[in-house]
Image (cartoon, rainbow, N blue to C red):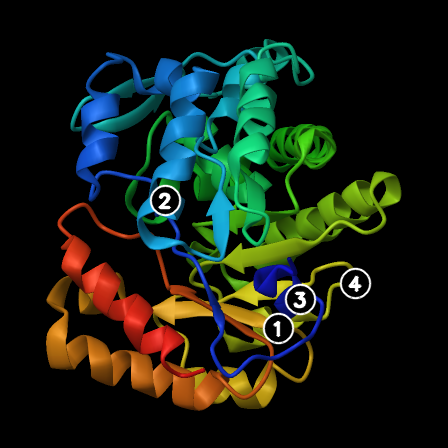
Amino acid sequence: MSKKFLQTLDGQSFASPAIWMMRQAGRYLPEYRALRATEPSFLEFCYCPQKAAEVTLQPIRRFDFDAAILFSDILVVPDALGQKVSFESGEGPRLDPIANAQDLARLTEIDMNKLGPVLETIERVKGELPAETAFLGFCGAPWTVASYMIAGKGTKDQEPARLFAYQHRDLFEKLIGQLVRASVTYLVAQLKAGVDGVQIFDSWSGTLPPAEFERWCLRPLREIVDGVRAQMPEARIIAFPRGAGGSHLIEVAKIPGVQAVGLDTAVDPVWAARELQGIKPVQGNLDPLALVAGGAALEEAVGRIMGALGGKPYVFNLGHGIVPQTPIAHVEQLLKLVRKAG
């Protein structure tokens, strides 16, 4: 059976668009919470192929989304580069911060043996997905991953990484280059293991001024896309530069090899229809809190987005990840609203 999601990335449009949600395998699902409770460490949970495959499949079984996304985390890459990574309950990720050349020198090239369990997860999921369901892999963009590696955690506006990039430009350039190489290796491995496409999450791209955005977001993205497609010429790649302004989104859309652009919640869908959809398919951008609210507020928000973007190649998604307090009934409402358009 054809996969509507992949056909959309290839430039087809549908009256009822393909739909999936970022973080669709997560804490809003009771079956996820039950399985997560069996593993004390989040990182080890990601590295358990049987459990990671199960939670990847849970939202497909419950909601029949048009695409599954691999359950993992962007910080498995620094872990595979030799940086110590852990997740503290209620506090998020913790890494040994990179403060100088000595810290940077301790990193290695990516250890794909470390990421073997992730590739096994892909193989397990691929064997169980319905034929019509696409399968996405992913990685974090170099700027976003580097921001955690420098600060040792998530911070407001990623100030430690921004300052480090100004003060130690050569070191930061070296780190970004290392992450570009690692990302290419990792994404190619995911594609060879069986995913149908990949998404590159630049969750913190909106914190950078224009010149720095070009240097640390656009250029590395181009290098990753070129590197992946040099080995996998037909690779489907979605770029999601969260927080990027209008002109930056246009620049991302114009990158050869990027097949679709993810839109965050702040992007005006009318503007996106006018300025982006003539260049590439787009994906997004429902406010996750509209999904929490449900009811008339959700119906209005979905109608506004579908009215603007629905006439051209478009994948329905959120503008950021689904939040844990989202009622399952509201996800069911969303699916009815999107699918009744067809």
Specify the amino acid type for callout 3: Gln
Element class at badge 4: loop
Residue 281 — which label?
1
Q: Mark number for residue 61?
A: 2
Closer to viewer: mark 1 or mark 4: 1
Quote the CA–CA distance across marks 3 and 4: 18 Å
For marks 1 and 4, the one nearer the N-term is: 4
Precedes in sequence: disc 3 or disc 4: 3
Whole-percent x, y for residue 279 in the image = 69, 79
Image mark for residue 7: 3
Q: Which residue is mark 4?
A: 256
**Whether label 2 touches label 4, CB < 8 Å:** no
Q: Left or right: where does residue 319 sit relative to residue 164? A: left
Cα–Cα span, label 1 and label 3 = 10 Å
Give the mark, 2 or 4, whose residue is nearer the N terminus: 2
Instruction: State which quarter of the image contains the C terminus.
Output: bottom left
N-terminal-most mark, 2 or 3:
3
CA gap between label 2 and label 3 equals 22 Å
